[in-house]
């Protein structure tokens, strides 16, 4: 079985184009983290070109952080092209459960498109699964079940890879569950680390057809860089600069020494 | 009377949700600074959810930096909900006076909504007050009166707390005027420090009903972090990273030692 | 003939207002780099104010990175005002050739407006010149001719200053070709350095009527700061912070020692 480093090495070698239709808050960092991992980001949301850009890309990342009706239209156009081309779609359900609009639009995207990887925090994913949860803005306050259970239920219901990020990241698919123990609390002090993780998953899924494994590897590499950066930072400002440096400097030795990925097959 | 630190401690304890409808230039930093201060930012501008998001928030920050007609519509929807729920609205009148569109829309927001805190630089606020001023783009070139006078006039005319940022920040309300001597010229070398200050005021007003005092405390804490960051920075790049670190590391000792807040009652 | 430092000194002295209608990915960095160079950025894309804002500015920067039809409309309004006022328009043709929409809209802007400086990477500019090229997303994969040739052809065909950034930057006009040897590969590891270069060119053209020379000087100063920053950075995160510091700290000594600008007249 390939290691997280092996999948990273494929990203760096193939430099896949990762198309994003995303939010205006973290759009820069989503692009920049994809570049730091060695892939090529492109952001294009006009309905006139969304499908064409998806058509030349190796993965499509959708993020509903600052969703509008017009953006949904472009997501559907790009998503249909992605599905027909067989490239993975990764959807970050930012704030699902916080407003009716977000919940409805996530439902619409899940109905109209084949979403390959669906990601959120525990509250968002519980809300999508119909489990009682509290989502305040874009924060998960409480979810009515354990992350593994929510994640497995979402993966089954929507026939996809489901990802819940948190203290331990969980990746569930029909084959089983990955638990990823990498990461650092400092990552939660900076806005955008959730969205960026989704973009990194997009880059890894662009080069590895086993999307559950690709997602687990992406989160492990990302979390390792977070740990390394936190160890030399004084706060969120220095952390963020160090985080990009550490992502860029990830190598086989660091990843094989630090990776905490456990797979529990069904 | 509570100190600036006391209000900061309430922000960190209550972690209020601060809803923003803001501009596309500094949207990330507005969110990130709210997070660094210990509160929860959320950015949502779709007219389908603007009111609902305001309805679960503890403060609403409006910023017209890259205003469009559609955004104004969402601001009105969110603002009406904020008013009916009794949560504070903080409006940053970026570029008021620079174009007719901005001046007209600020006037519209002030007519249709109860704005609790209205903030700008000297030129923008003079323009709102009908005092001759020069605003070039989003910069105040000259204002036809002293900041305290402009600020007091705006507070009276629009029955709100008025804030003018500058070398000395001024916060005026019907009770009197706060003068805040914290801050550093280095803050002016980085784009977004004005918008970020507004977001911090939003977070402080979310936990303290005396909005003038909350605004003064927000600006004092923010300015102290700026002073601490400037003392260890080589330019705008290192300053910005250090600024976030210092905001995150603010504590009682630093604030009580460095705060420069003077109140002149009427 | 003035040196790159002389033109920088004029930017710092005159602090020109540089109006942008640009993309949502790098909009912050475009503003921030203009500020770090000592000029005043303003971003305003609403059709209600685009022309008025251009009317009080000293240069207009157009960037199609996340183009929509509505933005094109505002670009035309602002551009017509810029042309009638005689201020320079700098257009960054991000992703031209990658989708039909981008290629068509660049063509439209070139037809309807007098574009003074047209900039892109080799693939984008080759595509505009009708030379066979491969543009993947916003990356130049291959161009069917040498950058100098493409650049000279574009300058001639569209009667403008043409700029191609790359290992050696090329600036072509009817008078000849500038080759600028400054810059560092680290600049390519960070998203936005291309867009930022365009904004810097806008600031320099705002104070110097010889747009080809202004563009060459802008790229030289920008590249020198990149070299200085790279020499003290560990990766893209620390590089970006250092880059702003070095831009801010550029002085006559550094620039005269390090500038690599060669002019080949026709």
Image (cartoon, coloured by chain):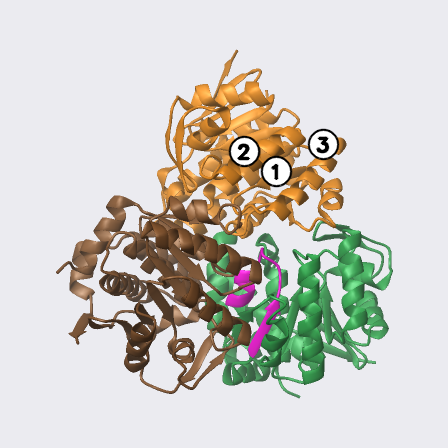
Chain colours: A orange, B brown, C green
Residue B86 forms part of the magenta stretch: no
Q: Chain of mark 2?
A: A
Horizontal side, residue B159 vs residue A43: left or right: left
Answer few, some or many: residues within 10 Å of disc 1's Cα (few below 14, many 20 plus, some between 14 and 19). Answer: many
Mark 1 and mark 2 in contact? Answer it, CB < 8 Å: yes
**Residue that numbered label 1 is attached to:** A203
Q: Position of residue B132 (x, y in %)?
A: 42, 86
The residue range painted magenta reads C17-32
Q: CA distance from mark 3 to mark 1?
A: 17 Å
> Do discs 1 and 2 belong to a common subunit?
yes
Q: Position of residue C25 (x, y in %)?
A: 58, 55
On the question of residue B105 being in view, the answer is yes
Residue for point 17% across, 72% down: B263
Q: Secondary structure at mark 2?
A: helix
> Do discs 3 and 1 belong to a common subunit?
yes
Residue found farthest to the left: B1
Q: Chain of mark 1?
A: A
**Residue that numbered label 2 is attached to:** A218
Q: Quadrant of residue C65?
A: bottom right
Residue B78, disc? none
Residue C28 forms part of the magenta stretch: yes
Residue for point 59% across, 82% down: C7
**Residue that numbered label 3 is attached to:** A83
């Amino acid at each position: 079985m390939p290691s997280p480093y092996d999948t990273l090495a494929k990203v760096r070698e193939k430099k896949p184009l990762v198309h994003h239709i995303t939010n205006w808050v973290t759009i820069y960092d989503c692009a920049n983290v994809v570049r730091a991992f060695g892939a090529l980001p492109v952001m294009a949301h006009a309905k006139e070109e969304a499908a064409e850009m998806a058509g030349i890309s190796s993965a499509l990342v959708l993020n509903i952080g600052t969703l509008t009706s017009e953006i949904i239209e472009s997501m559907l156009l790009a998503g249909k092209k992605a599905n027909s081309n067989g490239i993975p779609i990764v959807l970050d359900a930012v704030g699902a459960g916080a407003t009716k609009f977000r919940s409805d639009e996530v439902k619409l995207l899940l109905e109209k498109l084949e979403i390959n990887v669906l990601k959120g925090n525990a509250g968002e994913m519980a809300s999508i699964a119909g489990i009682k949860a509290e989502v305040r803005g874009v924060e998960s306050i409480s979810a009515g079940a354990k992350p593994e259970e929510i994640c497995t239920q979402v993966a089954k219901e929507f026939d996809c890879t489901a990802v819940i990020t948190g203290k331990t990241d969980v990746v569930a698919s029909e084959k089983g569950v990955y638990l990823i123990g990498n990461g650092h609390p400092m990552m939660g002090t900076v806005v955008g680390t959730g969205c960026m993780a989704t973009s990194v998953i997009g880059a890894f899924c662009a080069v590895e057809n086993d999307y559950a494994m690709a997602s687990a590897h992406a989160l492990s590499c990302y979390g390792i860089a977070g740990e390394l950066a936190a160890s030399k930072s004084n706060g969120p400002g220095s952390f963020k600069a160090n985080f990009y440096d550490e992502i860029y400097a990830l190598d086989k030795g660091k990843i094989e020494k630090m990776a905490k990925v456990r797979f529990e097959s069904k």
